[in-house]
Amino acid sequence: MNIHRADFPILNREVYGKPLVYLDNGATTQKPQCVIDAITKEYLNVNANVHRGVHYLSQEATRLYEEARETVRAFINADSIEEIIFTRGTTESINLVAASFGEAFLREGNEVIVTEMEHHSNIVPWQLLRSRKGIVLKVCPITDEGRLNLEALEQLFTPKTRLLACTHVSNVLGTVNPVADIIRMAHAHDVPVLIDGAQSVPHMPLDVHALDADFYAFSGHKVYGPTGIGVLYGKQKWLELMPPYMGGGEMIGKVSFEHTTFNVLPYKFEAGTPDYVAAHGLAAALDFVSCIGMDKIQEYEHELTRYAREQMALIPGMQFYGPSDNAVISFNVAAPPLGKAGRGTSLIHHLDLGTLLDRLGIAVRTGHHCAEPLMHRLGIEGTVRASLALYNTKEEIDALVAGIDRVRKMF
Ligand code: PLP
């Protein structure tokens, strides 16, 4: 049994009268009691707007908010708190960079490289910028195994390349990209790199300093924290040169109708009242996983992923997509052959499979997983995705395998 399950109250509930088997952690993770408590206690005892009041509660809320920033800094090993910007999540972090870095450094004809395995969050912001500024979007292909084609990537750099935006871990294929090598390659061409860490931060230790990433984005809710809070890490040398993303309170120095000056980092990028309670909740989540140890979580999830792939591979008609290096297993299942003619090698529709698994209490994701260009590359409409977290167990994998087999036999 997994000793950490007891920390997650929701895992005790039933759905359709069956124990919940929650395997949709790539979409969002469940919250441990300490995160729920941190949020509740702040609303019960502290709540006041941050950075604004001379009064006691405002100062205490501000202290908790800034302590949360320091917790994030230490967790990812950034050099300073100036480099930690609170956002609503990965999506907002990437949009911030696209808008602000794009405004400062990108001109018509400049090139941004993305990859074929990106989430829409790391494609569409660059397309919006393309409409505004006439930049060129170049796409690094993947291999048939679901890995980035690094030789092809090397060929994409030109004197016009201004940024590489790449995911650390694919939310569909479970591929862990060699981001340290990729960053080294880009820097050799003088190109800064943005890493989408939505699917990496919950599953492995991270050291942005050692990695030498220029920007690194992630979401709190995928790492056992609350919704509505995320992080953009950016090297100070870039953030200093970038204009504000949004205007409003907090991000200003002095305001008159003629002229406005901007606040120092990181506040220049935090217009308006931030979700300070969620920031505190995120810090509680990061403390929680740090206490367990990110290396231990990684080891446990690797073993669970390996076990799941092994057991699922025994199901006739199982088709995997990608290497599932890390906690993500995407698949489809062929329906059993129809009679002796051997027709019927068609796939069970991912939505049917997901819906019937749900009736057995098993929560998986189905569809294109916000990665439609990747689906085009794979030549499919969608997959079923089981994504794991530190609280999942081999018994739950067994339930998934038995569930898939049962559904398969219904077809
Ligand atoms: N990038 C990747 C790889 C993701 O998996 C996700 C969410 O699933 C996102 C970005 C977007 O995250 P959010 O919706 O929390 O902003």
Image (cartoon, rainbow, N blue to C red):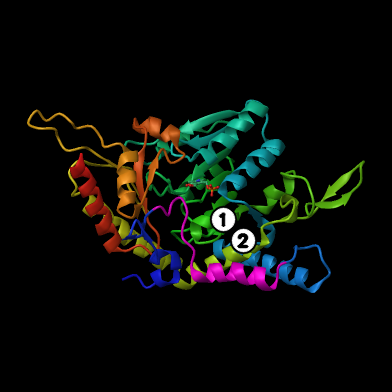
Residue 263 x/y as whole percent: 80, 53
Task: Check the image and report above or below for 312 versus 189.
Answer: below
Magenta part of the protein: which range? 24-47
109, 256: nearer the viewer: 256
Per the image, the residue denoted by label 2 is 278
Is residue 46 a member of the stretch shown in magenta?
yes
Q: Quadrant of residue 71?
A: bottom right
Per the image, the residue denoted by label 1 is 227
The answer to whether residue 185 is visible is no
**Residue at the location (30% across, 36% down)?**
349
**Residue at the location (30% across, 46% down)?**
356
- How many numbered badges does the structure rendering display? 2
Asked whether the beta carbons under mark 2 and mark 1 sit within 8 Å of each other, the answer is yes
Residue type marked 2: Ala
* Helix, strand or loop at mark 1: loop
**In this image, 255 relative to 177: left or right?**
right
Task: Check the image and report above or below for 130 versus 203.
Answer: above
**In this image, 285 relative to 53: left or right?**
left
**In this image, 96 relative to 22: left or right?**
right
Residue 247 x/y as whole percent: 77, 45
Residue 154 x/y as whole percent: 47, 36
The answer to whether residue 178 is visible is yes
